[in-house]
Amino acid sequence: MRSPRRCSRNGCPRQAVATLTYVYNESTAVVGPLAAFAEPHTYDLCEQHARSLTAPRGWDVVRHEGEFEPPPPTTDDLVALAEAVREAARPAPRPPEPDQNRPENPHQTGRRGHLRVIPPNH
Ligand SMILES: [Zn+2]
């Protein structure tokens, strides 16, 4: 069971939406969408820290322009979603069947007793 990825900054409890990657041979810090896999020299950041990141002296920052999207749901979330959909698709419980052998009021059951319907024109 995976826990949601959190910002890697000390004491920051927010969810990570971006990944900071240090490209050492180009002296570039790249702030991009959250990486699918954690790799060396990468740090997950929340949106606030991703936007406020400043590069070390002599480094460039390449920042993803546009909105940072929250990561896709984890497998656990997908399972929960599937269960919720299944629950919604389940037919509603049927109302209890009326007891046809013991109608509550025999006079309202539509029976006509000894009478029968006479067809017209006869
Ligand atoms: Zn943060």
Image: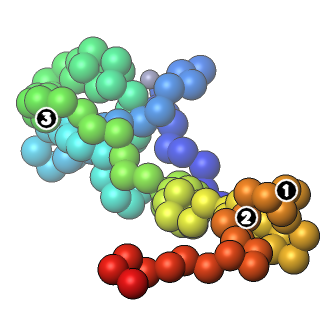
Amino acid type of the residue tagged 2 in the rendering: Thr
Q: Within 10 angstroms of label 3, few (less than 14), some, or many (20 or more) residues?
A: some
Amino acid identity at mark 1: Asn
Residue at (37, 46) in percent of width and height: 71
110 sits to left or right of 10? right
In the picture, the disc for residue 64 is: 3
**Nearest to the observer: residue 28 or residue 45:** 45
The residue that appears at 68% across and 76% down in the rendered structure is: 115
Residue 118 place in picture, x, y as percent: 50, 79
Judging by the rendered image, the residue that carries numbered circle 1 is 105
- The residues bearing labels 1 and 3 have C-alpha atoms spaced at a distance of 75 Å
Q: Position of residue 38 (x, y in %)?
A: 41, 56
Can you tell which of label 2 and label 3 is closer to the viewer?
Answer: 2
Of pointers 2 and 3, the one earlier in the residue sequence: 3
* Residue 65, above or below 102: above
**Pointer 2: what residue?**
109
Q: How far apart are marks 2 and 3 (CA)?
A: 73 Å
> The N terminus lies in which quarter of the figure?
bottom right
| Mark number displayed over residue 93 | none
Residues at discs 1 and 2 in contact (Cβ within 8 Å):
yes
- Residue 59 versus residue 63: which sits nearer the camera? 63
Identify which residue is drawn at 18% across, 30% down. 67
Instruction: Give the image quadrant in which the ligand numbered 1 is located.
Output: top left
Badge 3 marks a residue whose secondary structure is loop
Q: What element carries label 1?
A: loop
Residue at 24 percent of width and 33 percent of height: 68
The answer to whether 32 is drawn above or below residue 109 in the figure is above
Residue at the limit of the structure toward the bottom, as seen here: 122
